[in-house]
Image: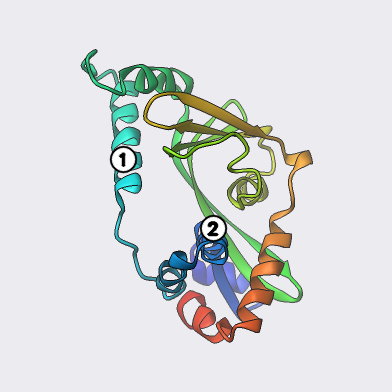
Amino acid sequence: MDLGQERASMGGNKVTRIRQSLLSAWQWSVRHERGYEDFLLTLQGKSIPANPMMQNGIKFEELVRLAIKGVAIPADHEWYKAIIATSKILRGSAEQAYKTAPITVNDRQYLLSGTADNIKAGVIYDTKFSVTYKYGKYFDSPQHPAYFYLWPDAKAFQYLIFNGKELFRETYYPFAVKPIADYIADFQKYLDMNNLTEIYEKHWRI
């Protein structure tokens, strides 16, 4: 179903797209002053230049994908153990699964979308690279609530986090997370209070 069909199925009313990445950018901007400019870029539908952490994350994920395909990773690679461990967890999974679903929050209509890195046996996996990782870092992330909404049959969501030395796991379950509608409601309130709703609707309206 394309976006036009989605809008028609929602009654033809005003619908805006929303993604967990936008909500995450907003969270970051609230907590870190330097993140506000990146949030405004995201709000305007613009790409953010990849910083070194993001570049390492992209590199790590690519090496994991190669290992899954059977490409030999040099044993002396500094990330070898983590690459192999992650590839074993993800081997046999569906990759880059994309899904959309309508959601109404406070009488406003949205089309929530997301791309799951990997899905296997009812578990959604997302690979992260974070040198500052501490357990619980993703507790209030909107990503797993959003994906539980998009994939309601999922049994669990697991973050696979590599800090450059060790691989960690954080697992969440659908019955024990804050609903994505609550994150969207807080986002609505923030946009309204800061006169950003018009910018959002201009760039994210279907």
Residue 131: image quadrant is top left
Indicate the position of residue 13 as horizontal and vertical percent values.
Answer: 64, 81
Q: Name the residue under label 1.
A: 56
Residue neighbourhood size for the residue with mark 2, other residues' Cα within 10 Å, grouped as few (<14), some (14–19), many (≥20): some
Q: Is residue 54 left or right of residue 117?
A: left
Identify the residue shown where x is 73% and y is 61%.
Answer: 182
Q: Label for residue 79? A: none
Secondary structure under tag 2 reads helix
Indicate the position of residue 105 as horizontal and vertical percent values.
Answer: 73, 69
Q: Compared with residue 5, is residue 71 higher up or lower down, i.e. above or below?
A: above
Identify the residue shown where x is 34% and y is 63%.
Answer: 48
Q: Mark 2 points at which residue?
A: 24
Indicate the position of residue 92 as horizontal and vertical percent values.
Answer: 45, 22
Indicate the position of residue 129 as horizontal and vertical percent values.
Answer: 41, 38
Q: Compared with residue 33, is residue 101 higher up or lower down, i.e. above or below?
A: above
Mark found first going from the N terminus, 1 or 2:
2
Secondary structure under tag 1 reads helix
What amino acid is found at the position of numbered circle 2 in the picture?
A: Ser
Identify the residue shown where x is 53% and y is 81%.
Answer: 201
What amino acid is found at the position of numbered circle 1 in the picture?
A: Asn
